[in-house]
Image (cartoon, rainbow, N blue to C red):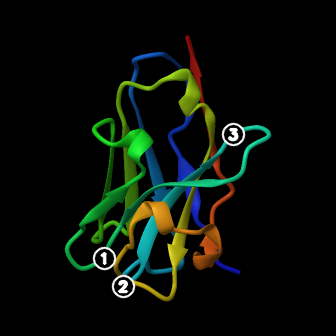
Amino acid sequence: QVQLVESGGGLVQSGDSLRLSCAAPGFTLDYRAIGWFRQAPGKEREAVACVSYSDGSAEYADFVKDRFTISRDNAKNTVYLRMNDLKPEDTAVYYCAANLMRSRCTAVATTRAHEFSYWGQGTQVTVSS
């Protein structure tokens, strides 16, 4: 079973920044659309951002546009999520996931977790006010 590995989470204050990383030991992220999702306590998992393989184009949820940036380094087999101006409502466990069926992302508003086959265990992001 392929396991992605997230890192970079932590406890920060409102307005701070974090960069999350998603690595895939023993598995290539090439040709896969890669998504970041998050799940807050008592809430459903929601899509945050997605990055396509070929041109690195990205899609974002409205609630993170202009604050978060997703990117990928294909040479390092790693995907990143840069999060700026963090808010308490961004507090959640953040997961990365690989879509085995698509190399290009669709709009995040229509992106569903079940479309992604391989997941990490998540990294906790906590933003204090």
**Residue 66 percent coordinates (x, y):** 28, 38
Q: Residue at point 37% right, 83% down?
A: 103
Is residue 121 positioned above or below 38 on the image?
Answer: below
Q: Residue at point 58% right, 78% down?
A: 115
Q: Residue furthest right?
A: 42
**Residue 106 percent coordinates (x, y):** 39, 73
The one nearer the camera, 48 or 22, is 48
Q: Quadrant of the C terminus?
A: top right
Q: Residue furthest top?
A: 129
Numbered marks: total: 3
Q: Mark 3 = which residue?
A: 40
Residue 119 sits in quarter? bottom right
Gap in angstroms between the C-alphas marked 1 and 3: 28 Å
Label 3 close to label 2 by CB (< 8 Å): no
Which label is found at residue 53? 1
Q: Amino acid at mark 3?
A: Ala
Q: Residue furthest bottom?
A: 101
Q: Mark 2 = which residue?
A: 31
The one nearer the camera, 51 or 110, is 110
| Mark sitting earlier along the chain (3/2) | 2
**Residue 5 percent coordinates (x, y):** 58, 59
**Residue 89 percent coordinates (x, y):** 57, 28
Q: Quadrant of the N terminus?
A: bottom right
Q: Residue at point 29% right, 71% down?
A: 74
Q: Amino acid at mark 2?
A: Tyr
Q: Is residue 92 left or right of residue 17?
A: right
SS at badge 2? loop
SS at badge 3? loop
SS at badge 1? loop
